[in-house]
Amino acid sequence: MDTNRLIWIDWMKVIGMYFIIAGHISPIGHEYIYVFSVPLFFVVSGFLCKYEPSDKVFWNKLFRNLVLPCILISFICMCYDASAQYRLGLFQWTYIPKRIFSCLTGMQGRNLDEGGLGLCWFIYSLVICKILFQYTFKRKQALFFSLLCCLIVAYLVNKDYPNLYNAVPNTCLAFPFFVGGGVFRVFYERIDFSLSRKYYFLLMVFGILMVVLVQELNGTPWMFKAVYGNDLLLFFTGGLAGTIVVYVISRMLESYNLKYVQTLSNGLILILGFQLIALKFYFVLPENYTNVLTDYFAAFIILLAFIPVIKFAESYFPIILGYRAKKEIKER
């Protein structure tokens, strides 16, 4: 195992992905999950993002780590959906160019017959966030202007165009969280954020109460269609509060350096891209076989089921993981 990695980051990513999967099942309480589950990942991504002095290195890493895996995952999902349409007798060849066009323009496909990025919208938005971060983080005025533009566009989209289902406007809500993660990294490298368990517990309780309060006041945000609820400030407050809760839990668990937690953390992009296919096997169960307990338990089982898939990809198809796992295997 890599002894230099931050174990609590692995825990945050895995716990966050569990909530993403659980939220897609839509069990009782899923509206509270939506308050923070997606913002959490952009905060973590911002924390892990580093400014690259060389533009060439930056673009090479961006293509290798995000763009190429996004293309591969989208292609596999397109083939899966096309085969399903073919079995139902609904497939038309025009589906393929329409699907490709939707993916290139950031469309998710929720309101289009031709489909689109699906959950890969997160990767698409993350690519935009990284580009903005690379060219504004060292320039305070440019960064402030970018954030201001994001807030204005987010306000207008939420008000007048609430059902775009496109990764580009979604980025306007994601980028402030991404920058927040980058700022937190700067302070984390200078300040010791370790607290006693008593203060961690109090901070966690406060965060949970804030998530509940924000959801009641702001309603349910839908970041995948750039909808933040009733109030933009409440949206950011709820996202940060939930992120703090997961951060506290992760710091309390960081003494448990589990191999499979690192595996899931390495393969997060794979889980993100293919979890809806896994969820279809759960959704075929009759309603009388499912309840709030089975929904949350199913999310846990689906998460664990990706462990052998990720290990297979590490050994035989590391390109779909952005080469991260391949590098880790060489270092062991």
Image (tube, rainbow, N blue to C red):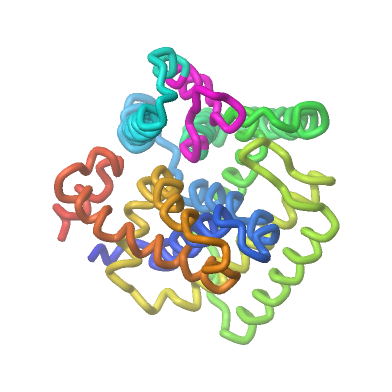
Identify which residue is drawn at 40% across, 61% down: 303
Q: Quadrant of residue 40?
A: bottom right
Which residue does the image show at 20% across and 48% down from the upper left? Answer: 326
Is residue 15 inside the magenta stretch? no
> Could you tell me which quadrant the N terminus lies in?
bottom left
The residue at 50%/36% (across/down) is 118
Magenta residue span: 99-121
Q: Position of residue 79 (x, y in %)?
A: 33, 30
Residue 312 is situated, as x and y percent measured from the top left of the image, at 19, 52
- Farthest bottom residue? 198
Viewer-proximal residue among 164 and 115? 115
Q: Is residue 102 magenta?
A: yes
Residue depicted at x 67% and y 75%: 203
Question: With 102 as the anchor, is 144 left or right in this view?
Answer: right
Give residue 210's quadrant in the image: bottom right
Residue 71 seen: no
Q: Pinpoint residue 208: horizontal percent, then vertical percent.
A: 70, 70
User: Nearest the camera: 72 or 132?
Assistant: 72
Foreground: 90 or 306? Answer: 90
Compared with 109, 265 (above or below) is below
Residue 33: percent from left, percent from top: 64, 60
Residue 80 in the figure: left or right of residue 16: left
